[in-house]
Image (spheres, rainbow, N blue to C red):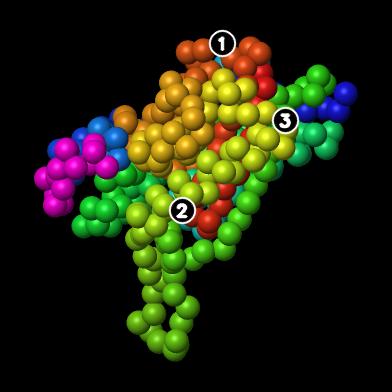
Amino acid sequence: MTQGTKIIASAHYVPSDIITNDDLAAIMDTNDAWIQAHTGIKERRISLQGENTSDLATQAARMALSQTDLKPEDIELIIVTTFTPDGLAPSTAALVQRNLKAEGAWAYDISTACSGFVFGMSTADKFIRSGVYKNALVISAEVNSKMMDFTDRTSTVFFGDGAAAMVLVADEEGGILKGEEMHTIGDAEVVHSGRIQPLTEISAENYPKTDAFHQEGRQVFEEVVRLIPDHIVKFLGDRDLTPNDVDYFITHQANLRIIEAIAEAIDQPMDKFATNITKYGNTSSAGIGIGLDELNKKTDLTGKRVLLTGFGAGFTYGSLLLEF
């Protein structure tokens, strides 16, 4: 049997500061009733204690590693998926590698926004399946708050900060990843963040400036609800499965109303969908990882099928089918 990948530990970490809808209503034209009605979000965690993306990622990684017999120096590969890196260089993954003192690992970032966890898990799986690597850390971490325009009530109310980490190891029994499908549709306008404009002249006044996060909320909602249910049904159908054959769905935690619309479109009950957006908000690439960790902690997944489906800026989307 071909060598595959299995998860031996998972963890998530969120900042300590809880920001409620009423807290946001105090600084922008919104209210708790509107936010809950349109998003399902009641509160979110925001990094207000100086923790950057690499700090959240490091905490989640340490928590996951503490559940295993592996030491940081045993780790061979670290992949961090993030839409909100500490900076363009060094990579957030390199900072995590330093923080963990994982001297034996090489590390890099993946930037596919809210699809990041799915893309990161798929990528790490390929390294392990190659037979060259025995283990990897996949971490999805976001400090979305630092990229928000807190006068933009249409975007800012959605987002929170957090991180999730998975320890993957080689499995001679073929592993848990039983199918995948990834897509990218180049679109620079519907969702964007951190744009830096090129120069038009050489001047002493030039200094890099980055723009805040922006999304066309209605367009995002309509595109996801149109595209993702069909993607899920086709993805499963190509493997002679239907949504009824899946025990749990973990989609990107974009908006509770989007998750409800996906569930309705594929005729599945909401109790099969992991949700953490009500308490953590949209944590971008970290949301699926947090959901998988929470499900793993409260449910015996032995013999269960779990479908992970991410969708995000780029436009990127894709699914992983896990069989535990």
Q: Where is residue 322 shown, x and y percent of the image?
A: 65, 27
- Circle on res. 190: none
Instruction: Check whether the beta carbons of the residues at disc 1 and disc 2 lie within 8 A of each other.
Output: no
Under tag 3, what secondary structure?
loop
Quadrant, the C terminus? top right
When the figure is inspected, residue 273 is found, relative to residue 185, above or below; the finding is above
Which residue occupies 51% across, 64% down?
187
Lower sequence index among marks 3 and 1: 3
Q: Amino acid at mark 2?
A: Glu
Q: Where is residue 108 shown, x and y percent of the image?
A: 63, 47
When the figure is inspected, residue 83 is found, relative to residue 286, above or below; the finding is below
270 or 315: nearer the viewer: 270
Quadrant, the N terminus? top right
Q: Which residue is mark 1?
A: 300
- Circle on res. 240: 3
Q: What is the distance, in whole Å, between disc 2 and disc 3 at their CAs?
A: 26 Å
Under tag 1, what secondary structure?
loop
Q: Where is residue 235 shown, x and y percent of the image?
A: 65, 39
Magenta stretch: give its range: 25-38
With 317 as the anchor, is 268 left or right in this view? left
When the figure is inspected, residue 301 is found, relative to residue 318, above or below; the finding is above
When the figure is inspected, residue 298 is found, relative to residue 122, above or below; the finding is above
Q: Which residue is mark 2?
A: 223
Which residue occupies 34% across, 51% down?
146
